[in-house]
Image (spheres, rainbow, N blue to C red):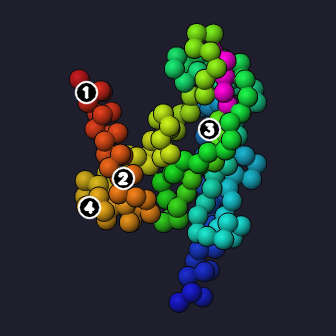
Amino acid sequence: LVREKTPRLRERHSLVPELLKHHQRQLAAKRIPHYLAPLPFRPAAELGEHSIEILIEPHAGIRGRCSRCQTPAPGYDRLPERRWLFVPLWGIPTSFCYAPRRVQCREHGVVVEHIPWSDGKRPVTCTMMGFLARWARRLSWRETARGCQTSWEGVYRSVEWCVEWGLAHRE
């Protein structure tokens, strides 16, 4: 069985660069202050496990934005690389890897830049939180956590985030 599953996993990884190039073109067209690195992912063969890490770099020509007031601000320094859990691609756990910049805002001083795919210090992307919350409506939270290879608490916090967002944005 192991011999049969390995080629399929390799076939999946051969599709990932094409998908990521497509997303990179979409991000460039929108002039978003982040872009995928030239080698945008580290496949499972390099990591020794079944996962994909999407490497993200800041766009050199666009300033970071203050996380509090969203205004562009000059850079200050960079923090160590962090990982955010993203929606699994073809059942393979996927994460974003990015070293956030700190910016020097006129109003708020030195703060971490606004990160568009995250909400605060959560280690999960907003897309993944929505994904988990949608599946938690259909399955038990434990089954959702097992299927998405995350914890029960991650599903709980995702549902909580979606409920708070919905209450804040209702008419």
Which residue is label 4 attached to? 139
Which residue is label 2 attached to? 153
Asked whether 103 falls inside the magenta stretch, the response is yes
Of the numbered discs 3 and 1, the one sitting upstream in the chain is 3
Which residue is label 3 attached to? 27
Of the numbered discs 1 and 2, the one sitting upstream in the chain is 2
Which residue is label 1 attached to? 170
The residue that appears at 64% across and 20% down in the rendered structure is 110
Answer left or right for 68 relative to 137. Answer: right
10 Å crowding of disc 3: few (<14), some (14-19), many (20+): some
Q: Which amino acid does label 3 sit on?
A: Leu
Q: Can I make out residue 31 in this image? A: no
Residue span colored magenta: 101-105
Asked whether 98 falls inside the magenta stretch, the response is no
Q: What residue type is labelled 1?
A: Arg
Q: Report x, y in % for residue 163.
A: 28, 38
Nearer the observer, disc 1 or disc 2?
Answer: 2
Q: Report x, y in % for residue 39.
A: 74, 53
